[in-house]
Amino acid sequence: MLCLGIESSCDDFAMALVRDEGIIAENIASQSNIHAVFGGVVPELASREHLRSVPSLFDELIDQAGVVPQDIDLVAVTRGPGLLGSLLVGLGFAKGLVLSIGSEFIGVNHLIAHLLAPGLDEDLEFPALGLLISGGHTQIYLMDSGYEYRLLGRTLDDAVGEAFDKTAKLLNLPYPGGQYIDALALMAEADPELFPLPYLDNQNLNFSFSGLKAAVARYIQKNPHFSLQEFAFEPDVEKLAANRPEIARVCASFNSCVALTLYKKVARALKGCPQVRSLIVAGGVAANSMIRDMMSKLSSDFSVRLTLPRQSLCMDNGSMVAYSGMLYAKAGYFHHLGVEAVPRGKVIPWDYCQRSP
Ligand code: KG4
Ligand code: ZN
């Protein structure tokens, strides 16, 4: 089966061609430079840029793979959750393509696609505990398979990636700032007294990062010189850590707070789910060095296998959408072309058409 995966839920437009054996070709149009200066994604700019990049992105992908559009058996597209305008561009293109080539079609849940992404490199082991940490979501799932899962916990306010990006903005680092905080944090010692571990004094599996964000904001308000005077699109983190060690220390303290909080909540979830055989950690923030180390400690503490996507599969990408779509299609799930986009904050309906696999 040759599957085209299309991802356009936020500010990146990504496409990939995947076969049973693995990834054939990938292409991505990143808008980081457009949104960097705003400290977050501007939805209208994102969808307009998507519309501009689709045709050339698709042509290049097809050329790179040495196939023609009619070779595609299945078109899988992210149907949500995400920015509505951005999703509509991907869905509109996918539906038009399906009408012209007559392939099968499936709308993919972006969150589940993130969690299944490491399946492109290794067999996933179920039942699994899935920790999804991205720019828009922080969730814990109990997964019996790729299509049988239950939400155990979620953030009550900011997503973990949002907390990274807002902290970066307070320091006057470019958007998305997670990667810079990660790099700076590696070059300093964390001060455990600087910020509180957020929302642990309870028995549930939910998260809340707004208190931590507010603590960082208060700290920087009291110490305004911590915010960089000059904005750089691509800051030299080594130079920065050497010249401004106090900023690197804020990053290390914040990063360690987040990593420890994730450790404690996931440990609580693992205690409650002794049947779990593996821990899958996915989403853009799964690229974070301190969090990867903490998750690896967790997996040895609880003797469960740790499954982490390689760095390139942590961020939004077309391959995870194609892979997830293929898995569902092989299990007999498809969509009619009437499938709708689902914006962030709304639950993705289970509205597949089912055939015998
Ligand atoms: O999954 P993703 O590409 O997009 C969403 O679906 O949201 O995640 C993007 C998020 C951003 O908030 C970005 O700052 C964060 O992932 N991120 C990181 C790192 N790399 C990306 N956060 C912490 N450490 C990193 N190394
Ligand atoms: Zn994502």
Image: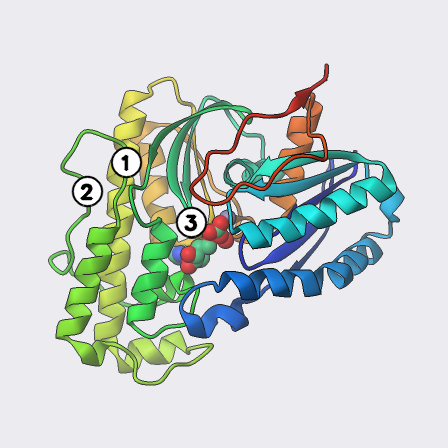
Name the residue tied to disc 1: 206
Q: Where is 344 relative to 232, above or below?
A: above
Residue at disc 2, secondary structure: loop
Q: Is residue 336 left or right of residue 249?
A: right
Q: Where is 335 relative to 200, above or below?
A: above
What amino acid is labelled 1 in the image? Asn
Residue at 33% in and 53% down: 290
Q: Is tag 3's residue or tag 2's residue first in the polypeptide sequence?
A: 3
* Residue 199: numbered disc: 2
Name the residue tied to disc 3: 136
Residue at disc 1, secondary structure: loop
Disc 3 versus disc 2: distance between alpha carbons? Answer: 19 Å
Residue at 42% in and 63% down: 179
What amino acid is labelled 3 in the image? Gly
Q: Nearer the viewer, mark 3 or mark 2?
A: 3
Mark 3 and ligand 1: say if the CB distance to the nearest ligand atom is below 8 Å. yes
Residue at 81% in and 59% down: 59
Image coordinates of residue 148 in percent, x first then y, are 51, 21
* Residue 302: numbered disc: none
What amino acid is labelled 2 in the image? Tyr
Image coordinates of residue 162 in percent, x first then y, are 36, 55
Disc 1 versus disc 2: distance between alpha carbons? Answer: 8 Å
Residue at disc 3, secondary structure: loop
In the image, 159 versus 243, the foreground residue is 159
